[in-house]
Image (cartoon, grey):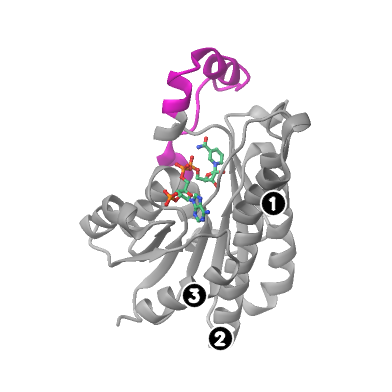
Amino acid sequence: MSTSRRTAFVTGASQGLGAAIATALAQAQFDVAVSGTRAASLGDTMGRIEAAGARAVAVELDLREPSNAERAMAEVITAFGHLDVLVNNAGITLRKWALEVTPAEWEALLDINLKGAFFLSQQMGRHLVASGRTGCIVNIASTYGIVGYAQRSVYGISKAGLIHMTKMLAIEWAEHGIRVNAVAPGTVDTPSRAAYFAADTAARDAIRARVPLRRFATMEEVAAAVCYLVGPQAEYITGHTLLLDGGLTAY
Ligand SMILES: NC(=O)c1ccc[n+]([C@@H]2O[C@H](COP(=O)([O-])OP(=O)(O)OC[C@H]3O[C@@H](n4cnc5c(N)ncnc54)[C@H](OP(=O)(O)O)[C@@H]3O)[C@@H](O)[C@H]2O)c1
């Protein structure tokens, strides 16, 4: 069990942004724990962490059940001995008119995107306060948590909650040396976005046309923002949401 290297836990890292963030943190000299709803889906990400010379730990975590947060954090802390960084990345999306959203869809979005992130953060806060260590939390929000857009109501509400949670926890935990920040990307070029847009190129073009820089973010750009926020250059930053939106919300 090593206590000298910095350690991070990235949720929802089986693919997409979570996998990219986990890889970037490994390249930045962190040992990295990753979660997915099935441990079997984490093999590729584990390989990329280990290829960067870091230790990788896989944890199964379904955030629909709040008690899973305590177990998953305990597994990570037992494996590493301590935890310095939590990245609340796991999330689901929903593209649906507000008139048609069901209570079950509302519950799933809010449970995974917001409630899950809160109770994982609570476990992280308890660990850091009890151990007297400083640490960081980064929440992966979205521009839909800041500006309105049709068919994204419940998703946007969950991300707006995450952005506000970032401020609330930053205030409560600053005295313990715990910094809490968020990253709010616009559309990111992830494999799942690419697959979705392949079937609807008109939607892709319409969304891209609204971005002043006329392109989507890369996963590496978002991962670099997370690395910055947990690094020494950002030690005076807390309660902040860093937009990576190509100017979308500057209108
Ligand atoms: N892609 C974008 O354009 C974009 C833009 C702004 C913000 N974001 C945010 O960035 C994050 C990652 O997005 P992505 O596009 O990379 O997503 P993705 O490819 O769909 O991956 C989502 C991750 O979340 C995990 N997950 C799903 N349901 C879960 C549950 N019930 N409990 C725990 N984990 C669960 C998945 O694990 P399994 O594979 O095991 O199901 C997967 O690892 C999300 O929070 C998303 O809202 C994305």
Q: Nearer the viewer, mark 1 or mark 2?
A: 1
Task: Point out which mark residue 46 bears.
Answer: none
Q: Earlier in the sequence, mark 1 or mark 3?
A: 3
Badge 2 marks a residue whose secondary structure is loop
The span picked out in magenta is: 194-222
Q: In the rendered structure, which amino acid carries the disc numbered 3?
A: Arg
Badge 3 marks a residue whose secondary structure is helix
Where is residue 186? Give x, y as percent: 58, 34
* Residue that label 1 marks: 163
In the displayed structure image, the side of residue 25 where residue 122 appears, left or right: right
Going 28% across and 67% down the picture, which residue do you hit? 55
Given residues 234 and 114, the one toward you in this image is: 114
Given residues 41 and 225, the one toward you in this image is: 41
* Residue that label 3 marks: 71
**Is the residue 166 above or below the residue 194 in the image?**
below
Q: In the rendered structure, which amino acid carries the disc numbered 1?
A: Ile
In the displayed structure image, the side of residue 159 where residue 186 appears, left or right: left
Q: Earlier in the sequence, mark 1 or mark 2?
A: 2
- Per the model, the C-alpha gap separating discs 2 and 3 is 21 Å
* Residue that label 2 marks: 132
Where is residue 163? Give x, y as percent: 69, 51
